[in-house]
Amino acid sequence: MKSTWSKLHKTLKIGIIIFILGTGPLLILLGLDALGLIDAGNAVGLGILAVLSFYPSIILIIIGSILTYRKIKKAKLS
């Protein structure tokens, strides 16, 4: 039996990984700043990284979702 991750299309996997790697550090930094543990200031460097990776990752996730749906639908018909 295949795991759920292996059933996903490669494009969707890449989009999810880029989204997590691009926005993850920014969200952690903003969370620590909100808790008052650190003073993040404006976090320009991480903000630019998050924006540059956000939109391409969303596009890959949408395309990958469609391709995954088609892949699963094709497997069920076979």
Image: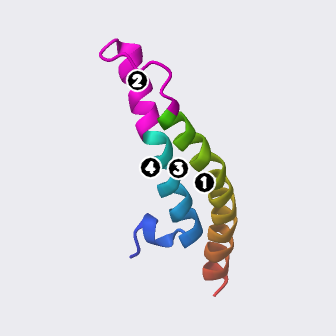
Determine the image quadrant of residue 31.
Answer: top left
Mark 3 → mark 4, Cα distance in angstroms: 6 Å
Mark 2 → mark 1, Cα distance in angstroms: 22 Å
Q: Say if mark 3 contacts mark 1, CB within 8 Å.
A: yes
Residue that label 1 marks? 57
In what element is the residue under mark 4? Answer: helix
Which numbered dot is residue 21? 4
- The amino acid at mark 4 is Leu
The residue at 56%/58% (across/down) is: 15
Which segment is the magenta one? 25-44
Mark 3 → mark 1, Cα distance in angstroms: 5 Å
Q: Residue furthest top?
A: 36
Q: Say if mark 3 contacts mark 4, CB within 8 Å.
A: yes
* Mark 2 or 3, nearer chain start: 3
The residue at 44%/65% (across/down) is: 5
Residue that label 3 marks? 19
- Above or below residue 65? Residue 40 is above
Residue 9 appears in the rendering: no
Residue that label 2 marks? 31
Q: Position of residue 11 (x, y in %)?
A: 58, 68
How packed mark 3 is, by other alpha carbons closer than 10 Å (few <14, some 14-19, many 20 or more), is many
Mark 1 → mark 4, Cα distance in angstroms: 10 Å
Magenta segment: does it hold 40? yes
Q: Nearer the viewer, residue 78 or 22?
A: 22
* Mark 1 or 4, nearer chain start: 4
Q: Quadrant of the N terminus?
A: bottom left
Q: Say if mark 2 contacts mark 3, CB within 8 Å.
A: no
